[in-house]
Image (tube, coloured by chain):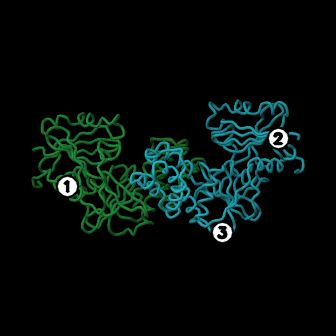
Chain colours: A cyan, B green
Amino acid sequence: MKPSFISLDWGTSSLRAVLVSEEGAIIEARSAAGGVMSVKDRQFPASLNAICSDWIETFGCPIVASGMIGSRQGWREAPYLDCPATPATAARALTTLQISDRVDMHIIPGLRCGSKTTMYDVMRGEETQIWGADVEPDSVCVLPGTHSKWAFVDEQSRITRFATYMTGELYGLLTKHGILGRLMEFGVGDKGAFARGATLGLNNPAQATHAIFAARTAGLMGEVPATGLPDYLSGILIGVEVASALAAEKLSTERPLYVIGDDDLCCRYEAVLEMASLRSVRAPDGATIQGHVCVAREAGILVSESA
Amino acid sequence: MKPSFISLDWGTSSLRAVLVSEEGAIIEARSAAGGVMSVKDRQFPASLNAICSDWIETFGCPIVASGMIGSRQGWREAPYLDCPATPATAARALTTLQISDRVDMHIIPGLRCGSKTTMYDVMRGEETQIWGADVEPDSVCVLPGTHSKWAFVDEQSRITRFATYMTGELYGLLTKHGILGRLMEFGVGDKGAFARGATLGLNNPAQATHAIFAARTAGLMGEVPATGLPDYLSGILIGVEVASALAAEKLSTERPLYVIGDDDLCCRYEAVLEMASLRSVRAPDGATIQGHVCVAREAGILVSESA
């Protein structure tokens, strides 16, 4: 297979590089810990070269990147694109950097929705995952993570709007730096505790900052063992997120939600969605790369026909 | 004035000692940074002696303590007392330690409410503040803090139940360790940003983990300056807390809520309560000491009549 471009999924905590063929297939995939937040003194070129300087030198092919690399803390700020957005509108709004005499890097813009009077919301990277997940028109996508996203795709397959829930970041902060972590013992999964937490969260979307305190009191009262408290808190937070989304949106109980992301997190969300009587379907792996292929085709970076 | 007992307000982050007269008045007050969390290797006696060994030796009077000193992380765990609770029931449930041949320390129990089927809630120290705040029967008390409390006092002046909101801890975690803090510049107050945040929070009690993300997007979009973002987040969190309490409880718009605690925090809560059309009245300073006096009288530690 002949290389056509390098796909970079460059997020906060990791960097994944894939050499993509003219048919849009994976020739080789690599990953590194060099996420945007771990790059010191803005040494982004060094991180890029460490993962794929050989590809750049040997093939001289362009790079397509998405994620926090286009944020203010990243290599170059790629201005947000307003919703509704598609691979075609993103392809017309790429931010391009020259990496060498013959190689350019194209950063896919993040998306923006909302307004000053309500609140703005933003995403970087998830739009590309959605475009690559091959979702049906008129769908809702759930992307669990540090900043979980619930995104709405319309009849014309445009991302029309989305909402961020800080579920993953709250879990990290509360367990690593907060009082809730003091009673916890990590490393042992407890599905029962997770389900109990999820029930509490699902029943109390309007009591989020109160309900999380149950991860202390249930430990103090011996209701949940120390080894179960991490999953109990995870359940509360995901339960609150799902119930908050249900409170804000008319979600169909017939049409499945697309769940896109890391396997462990997706399993947790699928369990809670089922508890809330919502159907879900898992998006195939490799959504980010397929999203890069879509945008690269629209931008004329990848010119051959699909295999 | 003749000393009768030493009042210790021994919380997570500070230690306050007051020498109380037989009339229940303050003879001398001292404070130190020796909160429970800063005491190393359980050296509680050293912290106590550092603040008031002279009083203990000279007057040999008993000590009455409340707060996290009675927690599992404190000097001695004082088992929780179930609601409904009064100074009289607390006086019958003191946990007593011998400090010296002639001096005992009596730790006031924290309170517990709720159940396994809903969730338990706990407080340590706030019960004493409420008893000392001289609130009218059938009242609601709001105690802002790391773990804010909304407590309900019935016709017989018993604390019947309460709810904890982790507002202060979330503010600390999100600003000190989280991504929201990255865009913030601290040290400059911004009442306008606070009010805008409070409006967002008040309007979105069922979207708490989503609404806090506005403290990032409003910064990214230039809607709130970096110096206003700390107060914007503070407003969102307090707004969510007040709206959550309103969603959970029938609160009278006629009868004022008692606001008890630190002046800066109380001012913030009073502003948000007013935005929510709730009346409030500030409890007098010194509520903790007065609470100790109430419990000491009920326990027979303070035997003279009130001045």
Quadrant in which the N terminus of chain B appears: top left
Secondary structure under tag 1 reads helix
Q: Which mark is drawn over residue A27? A: 2
Q: Which of B242 and B86 is in front in this view?
A: B86
Label 3 or label 2, whichever lies nearer to me, is 2
In the displayed structure, would residue B48 be above or below residue B225?
Answer: above
Question: Rounded to the nearest whole Å, what is the CA distance between mark 3 and mark 1?
Answer: 57 Å
Q: Which residue is drawn at 14% across and 42% down?
A: B61
Quadrant in which the C terminus of chain B appears: bottom left
Residue bearing the label numbered 3: A252
Q: How crowded is mark 2: few (under 14 residues within 10 Å), some or many (20 or more)?
A: some
Q: How many marks?
A: 3
Q: How crowded is mark 3: few (under 14 residues within 10 Å), some or many (20 or more)?
A: some
Question: Rounded to the nearest whole Å, what is the CA distance between mark 1 and mark 2?
Answer: 77 Å
Q: Mark 3 lies on which chain?
A: A
Q: Do the dots labelled 3 and 2 sit on one chain?
A: yes
At label 2, the amino acid type is Ile
In-image side of A121 versus A298 (left or right) = left
Cβ–Cβ under 8 Å for marks 3 and 1:
no
Q: Mark 2 lies on which chain?
A: A
Q: How crowded is mark 1: few (under 14 residues within 10 Å), some or many (20 or more)?
A: many
Residue bearing the label numbered 1: B294
At label 3, the amino acid type is Ser
